[in-house]
Image: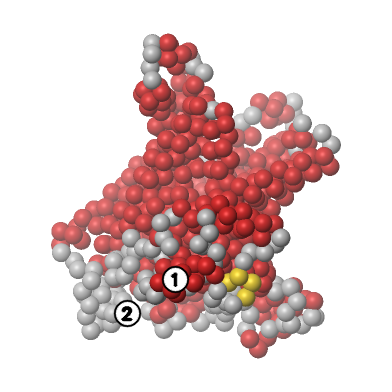
Amino acid sequence: MLISGIVIIASVLMLDLCANLVGLDPLKTSFDVQSPPSLGHIMGTDQIGRDVFSRVCFGTTFSLLVAFSSVIISLGTGSIVGAVSGFFGGKIDRLLSLVLDALYALPALIIAILISAMIGPGVINTGLAIAIGYIPQYFRIVRGIMLSVKERPFIESARALGAGYGNLIFKHMLPYAVTSILALATLNMGAAIVDVAGLGFLGLGLPPPTPEWGTDLGYGRDFITAGAWWSSTFPGLMIVITVLGFTLAGEGLDEIFKMSTTRKREMI
Amino acid sequence: MRLRTYIISRILLTIPMIFILVTVVFIIMRIIPGDPVAALFGGKGGSEEQIALLRHQLGLDKPVYVQYIEYMASLARGDFGYSMVRQDSVVTELATYLPATLELTFCAALLAIPIGVYCGVLAARHAGGKLDASIRIGALVRWCIPVFWFGLALQILVVQTGVALPISGQTSQMEEATRVTGMYVVDAILSRDPRALGDALLHLILPVLTLGTTMAASLTKISRTNVVDVLGEEYIKVASLKGCSEDRVFQKHALPNALIPILTYTGLQVAILLQGAVLTESVFSWPGVGRLLLFAVGYRDFNLIQGCVVLFALLVSAANLIVDISYAIVDPRVRF
């Protein structure tokens, strides 16, 4: 699973790289409006004569960039807050758990719609809007691991040797969460790509004329009844392939980590 | 603990949960740097007097804690504020649009739960075989297809093949039944109008397929995992060794135990179902709360946005409550 996932992700990235090297232009318009797939335009052209293939290739950069930034923001915030909450416990832990559990109950896309409506479009803004909904997942994982590691003897020894809070959390405890966080982040990357496209589709993603799969798909939908299926079909197909890559890789990682944890336990 | 006591304490626990959810929504809307009043002017910027007047009308010139207390007090009275764009109370707007969302999500769940659970159980029974592999791949691929693209693909398919299916809306205007509940299938049955009923059901097909299959895909995955886990338990081996037939072991020992976590997971799916509903409603021009939210976002209608999100939060809490109560009925261990 992991290998097929990585192969898919690598192929998508290669396509993006090749498009950059060949010098395709996603913004160039032509009089050849809404022409179906042909040898000249293998995925046809859109409503203002731009080559759909170029836009699909360049869309990779923006979609992945936004999704990646959202994963980094949620991973960073969620892990730190989770670590602090699990480490210190008590009232802070109870309060943070309550707030983040509430956030967890709200659908991530609805939070993203709410936030992007308030702060407007842009790579970081859209990334931030999507990130908020994912923070609770990292919080829960890291907090849980912190609670289980906290009581181990080596933490007590480190404390006795005079290790500070930062040292204890970041050097001794957080490394235990790295594998779980990595698997979750890979899975979330797939979900974030869908969210980026969803926001773009609803007109709340990156501003035009930036090539972005969801936005292009959304613009193309108005021409479906006229028979122009290509301008919304191909960006969608690209989303499915990329998400499939990240989901396979994430589940593959998860399986490997789980197996190694069970093996370690069996050895003990 | 008796079942009744458990249900009462669970209902009481929902109140602080809703309180926190609403507070979180309030905080998100206040700490984010965007200014709702500036947004209302669409970035063109009104005159200072206009902005000040609007801030006053919306109550945004008061200190945040006063705004919070006032907001909570009005929510407790069932007042969600006034929609500037719709010129109507937010509650009336929500009440108009909620039935369509409920109709869509309920029908989607009705399709997804049996299909998802059945496929998952079937795959688990044949774990490692060809049937298992094809069900797993099918569910994985469907899970990776975004709701909105699946909906569009269905629309393209219908348009290209010329199948006579409506591709948008909740009813045809000519066939509309008298509005009683707002759920047109129910309304058609209530007014004993078979033509309206047929029309409403036809309109439901594509949106329900779109939303339902998404949920079915994730239910398949989780059901399979749970059944496979249970089949690996010691007591299953004991039952087999005692000479129980394979079918009996499966039906009497494995299935009931595997279904309990699946029930919890189905409850958690409500959040995903509602998020999918927003996109599905947008694709199929379905007049539900999701479309109302997008409308409110388009016009930067602060109170209406807040109202829609709070309503979503309430629906999720209600679903969790129902799941927890049914969990306690199914599995008495929970109560102790």
Marks 1 & 2 on one chain = no
**Viewer-side label of 1, 2:** 1
Front residue (pair B163, B226): B226
Q: In this picture, is B79 found above or below A99?
A: below
For the residue carrying disc 2, how many other residues have a C-alpha within 10 Å: few (<14), some (14-19), or many (20+)?
many
Residue A8 located left or right of residue A41: right
- In the image, which disc is placed on residue B146? none
Which percent across, then down, holds residue B196? 71, 82
Say which of B279 and A87 sits in front. A87
Is residue A258 placed above or below A202 in the rendered structure? above
**Vertical relation: A177 (above or below) A58:** above
Type of residue at label 1?
Ile
Residue B58, image quadrant: bottom right
Q: Distance between the residues labelled 1 and 2?
A: 39 Å
- Relative horizontal placement of residue B225, taking residue A185 as reference (left or right): right
Residue wearing tag 2: A47
- The residue singled out by tag 1 in the image is B51
Q: In which quarter of the image is residue A18?
A: bottom left
At numbered mark 1, what does the secondary structure look like: helix, strand or loop? helix
Q: Where is residue B213 in the image (x, y as percent from the top left)?
A: 56, 60
Whether residue A235 is visible, yes or no, is: no
Residue B250: percent from the left, percent from the top? Answer: 70, 39
Q: Which amino acid does label 2 sit on?
A: Gln
Tell me the chain of label 1: B
In the image, residue A179 sits, relative to residue A65, either above or below, namely above
Image point (43%, 73%), residue name: B49
Tell me how many marks there are. 2
